C-alpha cells in the first residue's frame, strides 16, 4: 500500500528522520565511479546492470529517459510488453531502448548523452522499432517477447512486407508440428523462408533411421549395389559400397520446406557426402 510521509504516525516519522545514514561521497572519473557502485552493489538486492548505469550516468538525460521508459503509468507499457521481456521498475525497457539505439553500446551512448536535455533520438528510434514490428506482424504471439527486435529492425526494415502475407506465413508455420523453435519463425519469414536452421525442424529419430537403414541395406545386398541410393546410380568406386549406419545420414526424400513430413515413409539414408550435396541445394 502506498503511504505518504505526512500520513504516518509521528513516532514512525521520527524514526525515519532520525535514522543514521551511511553516505559515500565519491568523486572521480567514470571508471572510478563504476568501481564504487560495483562495491556498494555487493550488499542488499543487487542493482540490475541498467540500474547501475542510471546511477553512474545520472543527469538530465537519464531523468528524461526514465520518465518515458521506467514509468509504470505509461500507457504504452502494455504494448511494449508484447515484445520486450522484463519489468519497467527494474529498468528493462529503458535498457532495451538504449541497446537498440546504441546498437549494443549502452554505456558509450549514456556517457556521450549524459548532459543532453532531450532524448528525442532514443525515443524516436525505439518507437520506429516497435511500430515496425507491430505493423509487420499483426498477430501478437507469445514467442515474440524478448526477440532481438533491434537487430531484426536494422536488418529487415528497409524491405517492404505485405502484412497479410506475413500473417498467413506465420500462422502456417505455427501450425507445423515439425517446427521445434517457434521463436525462429519471425526471422525465418523476414528472411524470405530460406534459413530453416532458425526453425530447428524435427529430425528423424534413431529407431526410424535404424529401420530404414536395414531395409535399404538388405535390399542393396540382393542387388550387389550400394545402400546409398545416390551412390548406387553413380559410376564411381562407391557404386556397390555398403556404408555403415554411422557413415550415413537421414534425409527427407521430399524436403520439409516443400511439405515433406518427418516420418519413416519420407526418410531415406544417404552417405554423408550425398546428404551434404542434397542439403546444400
Ligand atoms: Zn552416396
Image (cartoon, rainbow, N blue to C red):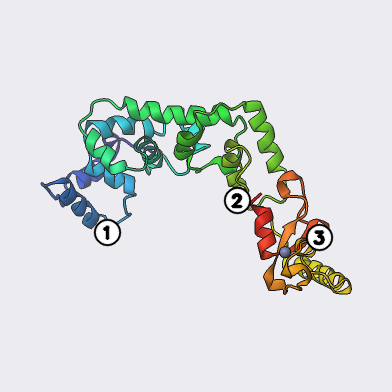
Above or below for 119 versus 111: above
In the picture of the structure, the residue carrying the numbered disc 1 is 42
Residue at 26% x, 38% y is 110
Query: In the image, ligand 1 is in what quadrant?
Result: bottom right
Residue at 16% x, 47% y is 18
Which numbered disc, 2 or 3, marks the residue that appears first in the sequence?
Answer: 2
Q: Where does the image place residue 135, in percent across and percent down from the top left? A: 56, 26
Above or below for 224 versus 139: below
User: Disc 2 on helix, strand or loop?
Assistant: helix
Question: Looking at the image, is mark 3 or mark 1 nearer the viewer?
Answer: 3
Distance, label 1 to label 2, CA atoms, is 41 Å
User: Disc 1 on helix, strand or loop?
Assistant: loop
User: In what quadrant of the picture does the N terminus appear?
Assistant: top left
Horizontal side, residue 8 vs residue 134: left or right: left
In the picture of the structure, the residue carrying the numbered disc 2 is 197
Residue at 48% x, 36% y is 155
Which residue extends farthest right? Answer: 222
| Tag shown at residue 264 | 3
Residue at 80% x, 66% y is 212
Above or below for 192 versus 219: above
Distance, label 2 to label 3, CA atoms, is 21 Å
Q: Where does the image place residue 94, in percent across and percent down from the top left? A: 37, 37
Amino acid at each position: 500500500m502506498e503511504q505518504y510521509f505526512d500520513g504516518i504516525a509521528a513516532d514512525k516519522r521520527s524514526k525515519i528522520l532520525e535514522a543514521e545514514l551511511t553516505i559515500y561521497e565519491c568523486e572521480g572519473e567514470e571508471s572510478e565511479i563504476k568501481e564504487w557502485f560495483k562495491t556498494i552493489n555487493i550488499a542488499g538486492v543487487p542493482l540490475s546492470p541498467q540500474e547501475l548505469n542510471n546511477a553512474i550516468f545520472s543527469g538530465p538525460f537519464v531523468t528524461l529517459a526514465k520518465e518515458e521508459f521506467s514509468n509504470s503509468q505509461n500507457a504504452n507499457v502494455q504494448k511494449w510488453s508484447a515484445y520486450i521481456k522484463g519489468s519497467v521498475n527494474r529498468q528493462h525497457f529503458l535498457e532495451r531502448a538504449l541497446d537498440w539505439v546504441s546498437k549494443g553500446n549502452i554505456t558509450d551512448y549514456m556517457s556521450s548523452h549524459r548532459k543532453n536535455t532531450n532524448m528525442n533520438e532514443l525515443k524516436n528510434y525505439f518507437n520506429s522499432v516497435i511500430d515496425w514490428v507491430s505493423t509487420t506482424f499483426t498477430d501478437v504471439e507469445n514467442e515474440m517477447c524478448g526477440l532481438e527486435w533491434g537487430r531484426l529492425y536494422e536488418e529487415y526494415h528497409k524491405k517492404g512486407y505485405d502484412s497479410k502475407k506475413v500473417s498467413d506465413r506465420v500462422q502456417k508455420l505455427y501450425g507445423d508440428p515439425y517446427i521445434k523453435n517457434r521463436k525462429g519463425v519471425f526471422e525465418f519469414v523476414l528472411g524470405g523462408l530460406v534459413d530453416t536452421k532458425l526453425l530447428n525442424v524435427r529430425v528423424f529419430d534413431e529407431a526410424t533411421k535404424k529401420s530404414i537403414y536395414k531395409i535399404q541395406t538388405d535390399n542393396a545386398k540382393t542387388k550387389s549395389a550400394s545402400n546409398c541410393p545416390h551412390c548406387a546410380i553413380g559410376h564411381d568406386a562407391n557404386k556397390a559400397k555398403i556404408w555403415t549406419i554411422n557413415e550415413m545420414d537421414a534425409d527427407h526424400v521430399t524436403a520439409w520446406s516443400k511439405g515433406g513430413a518427418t516420418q519413416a515413409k519420407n526418410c531415406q539414408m544417404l552417405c554423408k557426402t550425398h546428404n551434404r550435396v542434397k542439403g546444400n541445394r
